[in-house]
Image (spheres, rainbow, N blue to C red):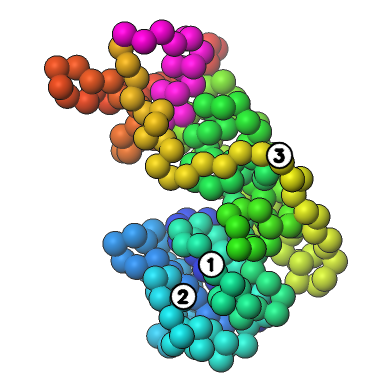
Amino acid sequence: MRYILLGNGQVASTILDWLVENGEPPVGLVVHPDEQSRCRVDLIDSAQLSNDSIFDATTLRTPETLRAIKNLEPDLGISISLGYILKKEFLSCFPLGCINLHPALLPYNRGSYPNVWSIVEGTPAGVTLHYINEDIDTGDILSQDQVPVDYYDTGETLYRKLEHVSVDLFKKTWPLLRNGKIECHPQKKNLGTYHRTRDVENIDEVFLDREYSARYLVDLIRARTFPPYRGAYFVQEGKKVFMKLALEEEG
């Protein structure tokens, strides 16, 4: 299987390491630019590719990059935590398509911050490996696993759970996909949820004189607890006061 990995972050790095260790290195690598990247150096070191087979994700729509991608003759694209929308011209470079590992139980929580919205909205959490089409997280599903959301989970602890299950799901699905022994199925239409990156801005501010249920406030603050990132806040004397929540189960 000749594949190009499009990755950012620890899950992408862990999976690439696993593929290389099992004798399946990529023929190409797509990474975020330095200022937006996580684990960029680790990904490049693991891939062991020449510079002309490593691409900046901001260039994926240019004729030069598309031509270079095609010249590598990849069968499949593997996207893991890539923060860029892939267009038809790029997807057409892969005869077997392009797959994405998304940390949500699709069709719930398409888009951004699935770890936050599963807590705030009470939607199922999980991980899905699916084909990429021209819409966001709507392609046919190859495999998925549900992840329980405990009442003491925060945005951070749920994120870590999803990372762990993401790696496990890929490892058990990859041999089936590579050997053509897996069937995909379409997502159910008119079902699920979708959120943009900026949607959290609409829930982060807590208004001190507004009535909320205790459950909503607890869920909001714990969902946005992910140090060192700032999350939910209230405004006092013209200044934002940021909140985080520590939860500890009795016994």
x and y percent of residue 180 in the render? 82, 71
**Secondary structure beneath label 2:** loop
Question: Magenta: predominant secondary structure element?
Answer: helix
Highlighted magenta segment, given as a residue range = 209-224
**Secondary structure beneath label 3:** loop
In this view, the residue farthest toward the front is 190
- 116 on left or right of 93: left
Residue closest to the eye, 161 or 64:
64
Residue 12 showing in the rendered view: no
Q: Is residue 114 magenta?
A: no
Which residue is painted at 59% across and 46% down in the image? 110
The tag on residue 191 is: 3
Disc 2: which residue:
60
x and y percent of residue 215 in the render? 51, 13
x and y percent of residue 212 in the render? 44, 11
The answer to whether marks 2 and 1 mark residues whose Cβ atoms lie closer than 8 Å is yes
Task: Give residue 174's quadrant in the image.
Answer: bottom right
Looking at the image, is 226 positioned above or below residue 76? above
Amino acid type of the residue that numbered disc 2 sits on in the rendered structure: Leu
The answer to whether marks 3 and 1 mark residues whose Cβ atoms lie closer than 8 Å is no
